[in-house]
Amino acid sequence: MSEPVWWQTAVIYQIYPRSFQDSNGDGIGDLPGITHSLGYLADLGIDAVWISPFYTSPMADFGYDVADYTDVDPLFGTMADFDRLLAAAHRLGIRVIVDIVPNHTSDQHPWFLESRSSTDNAKRDWYIWRDAGPAGSTPNNWLSAFGGPAWEWDPVTAQYYLHTFVPDQPDLNWRNPAVVEAMHDVYRFWLDRGVDGFRIDVAHRIMKDPELRDNPPAPADRESTFKWMGEYESQLHIHDQGHPDIHDEYRDLRTIIDSYQPPRVLIGEVHLFELEEWAGYYGRDLGEMHMPFNFTLLYAPWTAGEVRKRVDDLEAALPPGAWPNYVLGNHDEPRLATRFGAHATRVAAMLLLTLRGTPTLYYGDELGMEQVPIKNQQDPWAVREPELGRDGCRTPMQWDSSTSAGFSAADPAQLWLPLEAEHADRNVAVQTDRPDSLLTLYRRLLALRRSMPALHRGDYTPVNSTSEDLFVFERSSGDERACIVLNFNDRPIRFDHEGFADAEPVLSTTLRRVAISGSAVSLAPHEGVIVRL
Ligand code: GLC
Ligand code: CA
């Protein structure tokens, strides 16, 4: 390949700002807290942070309901705090990616307050308003992703407005050029401030069917996609998202991004199960997003065969020149350690950091943090569908063994979400001191990935093995070749490879020395090994 761009060789670390580090003792993480923790991230060996929204917000969806795209919510700090964070990160060589939420605003955004004030307001058409159907029914059958209808009745102006998420998050009308212009100004505002790129929230949702046609019912035998989403699964979501016109917007946005130097990155949250449609977001001639997030492994059954299939399918679906990426956890999904099981965390770490493409690591996964059962959930989704609540993967980062885990000076009872029960034992301080901890494994993997071109920029070739419990693949760049052998089962396995005869194992997930005998390596249950060929 030609010389890679920074985001191709980078490892991205996602920070959920409410939960990373609280600098003022109010029990909620904030921007100065992140700045304070940058040394940890530099030492861990990541290259970029993506920070979930920290803008002015009533917090109906914890910041994904934005009331001012160009200011910082006082809960998180000030614009000066953001500038300090950005400067401090750049001094350490860490890039900063911010999260833009273009599909909807808060219902408290001045644009929406104007829009809802009267039917002839100049901003009326900035949102999607429609008359009631027969007998007061909703304008069509669209459903909110968080439960219930996607339409909210507004008694003042006697029309419905569309909200893909909760009613506090009205959808913007991207078919109105004034909205497009205003949102482009938002992107420019942050680019001018010096951010290194964007993660675009529900990027595939901004353009809907212009006629707002009903979605067809889902066939009863349809395979579930990522995760079961309740009533929302009863329809095929073909008219309420991803209208082909969407690609014009991402081409235009890419042109804006590309006018900035040094190069910035455009990453989209594109939750589409059909790989072909998903791949369309790279754009014809790759002129749209640098990377639509790839979620295919999030819900993969944790077997070697299923994981390999998803990786191979992804590689096959990539248009020429498209750069892959992998995600194993984020603020919307049950913690990796709980979803796949605690036994899987080490192989998951090695998988994420040795596949071809840009990995995104969710804060706390490097410690093996688990999904925390929360009694009184705050997530607006949980209020409607308790089993889909996301609070449990958003609990405070565990820094040390003190009562509030070094996250905050506040009492544990004052933290916005409770700590994981094991926090006194599972935290940065404890795991830093243990040579065989998961955190140590992440550090070693990140350092190895950075030092080996085969790992951060090499080709990917799957290797067939006689055991269905192994996922084996090679990465190579120039003369450098590495073979990754991952055991997904709970019994030991020997793996024979002709290339191993005089090869050197460089890292095992157990962090113990591994020996090759003859041309075979013996793996413990749930062990992964990287061998330099
Ligand atoms: C995205 C975010 C999620 C948020 C939703 C609405 O899926 O990742 O946290 O609730 O969009 O903005
Ligand atoms: Ca705080």
Image (cartoon, rainbow, N blue to C red):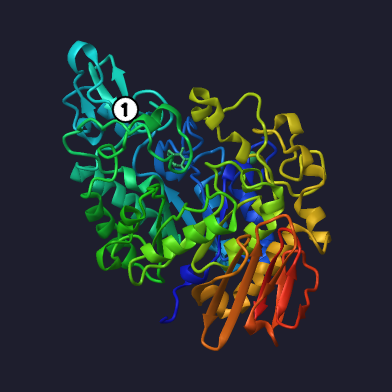
The N terminus: image quadrant: bottom left
Measuring from the top left, give residue 12's x and y in whole percent.
Answer: 54, 60
Name the residue carrying label 1.
113
Measuring from the top left, give residue 245's x and y in whole percent.
Answer: 20, 49
Label 1 crowd (10 A; few <14 / some 14-19 / many >=20):
some
Q: Is residue 327 above or below residue 316?
A: above
Q: Is the CB–ligand 1 distance for label 1 below 8 Å?
A: no
The C terminus: image quadrant: bottom right
Measuring from the top left, give residue 532's x and y in whole percent.
Answer: 65, 81
Q: Is residue 472 left or right of residue 155?
A: right
Q: Amino acid at mark 1?
A: Leu
Choose between 403 and 363: the one closer to the eye: 363
* Direction top: furthest residue: 135
* Direction front: furthest residue: 466
Residue in view at x 25 percent, y 38 percent: 239
Residue in view at x 31 percent, y 37 percent: 237
The answer to whether residue 152 is visible is yes
Q: Is residue 321 left or right of residue 19?
A: left
Asked where in the image residue 292 lies, by quadrant, the reply is: bottom left
Choose between 102 and 503: the one closer to the eye: 503
Q: Is residue 273 above or below residue 39?
A: above
Element assignment for label 1: helix
Question: Image quadrant of ligand 1?
Answer: top left
Measuring from the top left, give residue 419's x and y in whole percent.
Answer: 72, 37
Q: Is residue 100 above or below residue 222?
A: below
Q: Is residue 515 above or below residue 360?
A: below
